[in-house]
Amino acid sequence: MGEPLTGRLGRACRRVAVGLIARAFPRDTLSEIEARIARHSIGRQVIIVGGVLALLFACLYVAVQFGWIGLAIFIVGVAVLVG
């Protein structure tokens, strides 16, 4: 029947977090960052990925306070970061 949703969702969240970290610190490649995160325990990996996504959500929350213009700026900013 395929893979459970939690596995796919976890990988998607991890890819987003790795992509954002890679754009914030361009001296490291995606594979280097992925390997660095994979060396940590599962609990630490969850904290790293969750922290990056929480920061992204907090930025979204602040942007939404400025209405549709703030949301548009946030979306453009994320698009530029993710590439």
Image (tube, grey):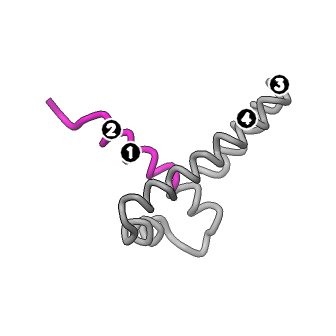
Q: Is residue 2 magenta?
A: yes
Residue 3, located in which quarter of the rendered image?
top left
- The answer to whether 61 is drawn above or below residue 79 in the figure is above
Identify residue for label 3: 67
Identify residue for label 4: 61
Decide: marks 1, 4 in contact (CB < 8 A)?
Answer: no
Three-letter residue code for mark 2: Thr
- Identify the secondary structure beneath mark 2: helix
- Identify the secondary structure beneath mark 1: helix
Residue 10 marker:
1
Residue 34: where, in percent of width, then height?
Answer: 42, 65
- Label 3 neighbourhood size at 10 Å, few (<14), some (14-19), many (20+)? few
Q: Nearer the viewer, residue 31 or 7?
A: 7
Three-letter residue code for mark 1: Gly
Which residue shows up at 44% across the image and 51% down it?
14
- The answer to whether 32 is drawn above or below residue 80 in the figure is below
Span shown in magenta:
1-17
Mark 3 / mark 4, whichever is N-terminal: 4
Mark 3 / mark 2, whichever is N-terminal: 2
